């Protein structure tokens, strides 16, 4: 038994030892897994931080303290040299104060209340940060807190104030990187106090000292410094003009914190608290420059956007950089072209006269150079420009473009997809069912032309045809083309029939967007961003931003050629007749009229320039032009005539291959309606053309001396064989009543004439053109158009009707 007990004991020891060994191995394995996993996650986190949390803030405070006005340059006409055009000055209530001029009490007041360990940390106060995150997770709230002055400065510069963990982590790592890159504490204090908001549209300590105490910053007392610093926490709550008690309470809190941190003595604290604060508004020292031109303001806005993107800061910070950083901006303006625009736009006598409104008819124009996309001239309004940083009608305002959008949203993408050519036939009729919607438009003139080709539909601006073509293309494809290929800023609700087929966009389009879109037609199908400057250099002349947006091949050169060909006809014979430049230069384009005639457009181009003109009222209402016509086309013609007067004549460019495979579309056939008597004599006849498969219903007319011997109506279901497309009404001749002699007629009456009624026409059938052997669309030639163009539309200037009558229209529907 003793031996057996020993064996059992040894076995037990071995078992316990094995369990302990297994436990140790298990714990070691788990620890190794934890360490390995932690290391992996640490590496992933480091990579994530590097890739996502430390990028996007490429900025040095040196860029804010240069104190040089930025300059816009313009190319000297006829040369490759540039000259100064405009100096950019700040328009904010802001006066820069150098660090050496900031009172020490002001700096210490800020540090005491906002970041007491400011001089010890390297951008992030880890004690406060850990506490802030702990508070967030415990309270489940997003009010992190814990931001240092450096973090607050970065937040103010970037405008990124979203309350998320992602934003907070980004802010932390940006602050560490910011101080690591050589931005010392004094520079951070200087920029913070010059950029922070002090209420009442005052940015920076210089403007605040002047506004609240009427003093220079260097003259502020300790009490006044604490009072002003207290405003930054909540400018609306601590504004001394609105809530003096709250400001005083905040001031004393700051003074107590300064005492606790050892920045002031007990005696200094007591004297500051007892000092009577005298608030007094000083004279504003904001610089008010001469009025910028519309082009200046477009360049400034674009440069601010570029700097904001380049430096990772918000637009307000970028604006401050632009006003002090000494940047050199090279604009795309052509001073000669701009002078011609100003000659028309600044003279109200050149703007079409309207009636029925007390408002001044307004207008905007953007002129773009083909190929480059350079904006060479623009105007954001008519008359003398009053003020700066106004809302430009050329680059900012959005209005519905009406039918002028059709070439961009419907016809160009459909032609490029092989769905149509200029010769493709569609039925301009009121009873067409679209496949994707129950919606269907009417034409502005209230009439319908029957089967017509795409050329005629564009020239005459037929709403029914644009809707049918969009139905084949689909609104989704049109929307993608406008957004992705042409760069339009569309609303999601614009992916629908009415916005894309008729131009009734939810928020409208800018004149600049329309100019960039139409510019593709004269640029062989390539769409380039319409830009106002080519590059930005820093104060040393080094290029920091090249404005070279990637061009987009929107449509083929062949499509651009045929769209230009058709749009040229729209100016020569259609709705754009008021914009014709005659023999001076070829012109092509499309008019547009928004709902209720509240906006009128002309989007057009020549071989030299693309120009888009909008006209309307600032408060939209119907436009009634004295003498009629499209006011936008009228202004377009005036400006472009001046621009092209001294330019040599040239035609639109053509690609080497202009072939398009034929797309027949609707098949049409001739039909005939005959009225005859019992002897076979023809009393009246109508011939016309209609789509195959269409049912036409005719009503028999009345002929004096004849009685209808057949049914009162007849139906033709049009087939491909014209001999079968026949309707006949038969009549019986009535016995004539004795005709009274002239002596027997009542006074004033004459004998009735012989023959059929005057209203029954005899119309020859319209021949169906034979496609050329090459398969290319057939360009129209006289006598395809039977009437010379005229300059003006009907006197009411209302509907989007052709300003010329280009077609001797055959019977589009039954006339009997």
Image: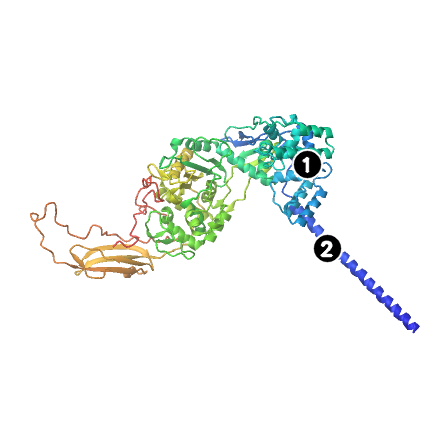
Q: Mark yes or no: residue 736 visible.
A: yes
The residue mark sitting in front, 1 or 2, is 1
Q: On the image, which quarter does residue 149 sit in?
A: top right
Residue where numbered disc 2 is placed: 37
Q: Position of residue 258 (x, y in %)?
A: 71, 33
Q: Residue 424, position in %: x, y?
A: 38, 53
Quarter of the picture holding the C terminus: bottom left
Q: Residue 399: x, y in percent? A: 44, 42
Tell me: 304 left or right of 561.
Answer: right
Mark 1: which secondary structure?
Answer: helix
Label 2: element kind:
helix
Tell me which label, 1 or 2, sits earlier in the chain: 2
- Furthest residue toward left: 743
What residue does disc 1 label?
Answer: 113
Q: At x 67% / y 28%, what residue is drawn? A: 274
Q: Nearer the viewer, residue 6 or 485?
A: 6
Out of 37 and 685, give the one closest to the viewer. 37
């Amino acid at each position: 038994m003793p031996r057996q007990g020993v064996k059992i004991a040894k076995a037990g020891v071995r078992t316990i030892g094995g369990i302990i060994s297994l436990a140790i191995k298990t714990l070691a394995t788990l620890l190794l897994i934890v360490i390995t996993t932690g290391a992996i996650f640490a590496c992933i986190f480091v990579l994530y931080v590097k890739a996502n949390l430390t990028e996007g803030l490429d900025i040095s405070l040196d860029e804010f303290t240069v104190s040089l006005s930025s300059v816009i340059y313009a190319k000297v006409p006829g040369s490759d040299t540039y000259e100064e055009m405009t100096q950019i000055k700040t328009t904010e209530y802001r006066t820069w104060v150098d660090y050496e001029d900031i009172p020490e009490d002001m700096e210490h007041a800020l540090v005491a209340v906002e970041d007491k360990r400011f001089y010890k940390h390297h951008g992030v106060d880890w004690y406060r940060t850990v506490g802030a995150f702990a508070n967030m997770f415990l309270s489940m709230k997003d009010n992190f807190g814990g931001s240092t002055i450096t973090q607050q400065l970065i937040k103010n510069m970037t405008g990124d104030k979203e309350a998320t963990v992602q934003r907070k982590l980004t802010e932390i790592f940006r602050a560490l990187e910011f101080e690591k890159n050589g931005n010392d504490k004094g520079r951070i204090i200087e920029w913070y106090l010059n950029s922070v908001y002090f209420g009442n549209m005052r940015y920076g300590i210089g403007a605040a000292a002047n506004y609240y105490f009427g003093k220079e910053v260097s003259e502020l007392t300790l009490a006044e410094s604490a009072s002003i610093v207290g405003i930054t926490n909540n400018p609306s709550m601590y504004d001394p003009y609105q809530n003096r008690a709250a400001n005083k309470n905040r001031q004393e809190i700051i003074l107590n914190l300064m005492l606790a941190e050892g920045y002031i003595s007990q005696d200094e604290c007591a004297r500051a608290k007892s000092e009577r604060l005298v608030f007094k508004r000083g004279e504003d020292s904001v610089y008010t420059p001469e009025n910028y031109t519309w082009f200046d303001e477009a360049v400034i806005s674009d440069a601010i956007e570029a700097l904001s993107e380049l430096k990772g800061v918000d637009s307000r910070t970028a604006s401050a950089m632009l006003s002090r950083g000494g940047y050199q901006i090279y604009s795309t303006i052509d001073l000669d072209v701009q002078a011609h625009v100003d000659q028309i736009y600044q003279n109200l006598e050149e703007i079409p006269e309207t009636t029925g409104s007390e408002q001044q008819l307004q207008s905007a124009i953007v002129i773009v150079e083909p190929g480059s996309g350079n904006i060479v001239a623009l105007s954001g309004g008519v008359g003398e420009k009053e003020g700066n940083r106004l809302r430009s009608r050329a680059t900012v305002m959005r209005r519905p473009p009406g039918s002028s959008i059709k070439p961009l949203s419907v016809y160009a993408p459909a032609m490029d997809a092989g769905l149509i050519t200029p010769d493709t036939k569609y039925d301009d009729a009121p009873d067409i069912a679209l496949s994707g919607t129950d919606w269907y438009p009417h034409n502005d003139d209230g009439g319908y032309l029957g089967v017509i080709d795409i050329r005629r539909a564009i020239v005459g601006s037929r709403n029914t045809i644009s809707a049918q073509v969009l139905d084949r293309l689909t609104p989704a494809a049109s929307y993608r083309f406008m957004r992705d290929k042409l760069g339009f800023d569309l609303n999601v609700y614009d992916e629908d029939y009415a916005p894309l087929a008729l131009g009734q966009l939810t928020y409208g389009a800018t004149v600049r967007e329309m100019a960039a879109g139409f510019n593709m037609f004269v640029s062989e199908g390539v769409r380039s961003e319409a830009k106002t400057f080519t590059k930005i250099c820093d104060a040393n002349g080094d290029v920091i931003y090249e404005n070279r947006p990637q061009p987009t091949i929107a449509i083929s050169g062949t499509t651009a050629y045929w769209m230009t060909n058709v749009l040229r006809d729209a100016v020569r014979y259609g709705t754009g007749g008021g914009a014709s430049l005659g023999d001076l230069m070829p012109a092509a384009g499309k008019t547009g009229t928004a709902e209720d005639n509240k906006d009128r457009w002309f989007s057009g181009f020549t071989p030299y320039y693309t120009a888009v003109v909008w006209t309307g009222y600032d408060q939209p209402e119907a436009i009634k032009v004295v003498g009629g016509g499209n006011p936008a086309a009228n202004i377009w013609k005036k400006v472009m005539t001046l621009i092209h007067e001294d330019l040599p004549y040239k035609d639109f460019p053509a690609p080497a291959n202009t072939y398009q495979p034929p797309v027949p579309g609707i098949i049409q056939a001739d039909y005939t309606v005959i009225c005859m008597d019992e002897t076979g004599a023809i009393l009246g006849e109508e011939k016309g053309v209609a789509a195959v498969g269409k049912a036409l219903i005719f009503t028999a007319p009345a002929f004096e001396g004849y009685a209808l011997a057949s049914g009162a109506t007849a139906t033709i279901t049009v087939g491909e064989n014209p001999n079968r497309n026949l309707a006949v009404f038969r009549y019986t001749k009535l016995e004539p009543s004795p005709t009274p002699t002239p002596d027997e007629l009542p006074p004033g009456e004459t004998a009735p004439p012989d023959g059929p009624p005057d209203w029954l026409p005899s119309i020859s059938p319209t021949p169906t053109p034979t496609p050329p052997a090459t398969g290319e669309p057939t360009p129209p030639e006289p006598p395809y158009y039977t009437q010379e163009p005229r300059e003006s539309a009907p006197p009411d200037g209302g509907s989007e009707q052709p300003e010329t009558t280009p077609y001797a229209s055959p019977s589009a529907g039954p006339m009997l």
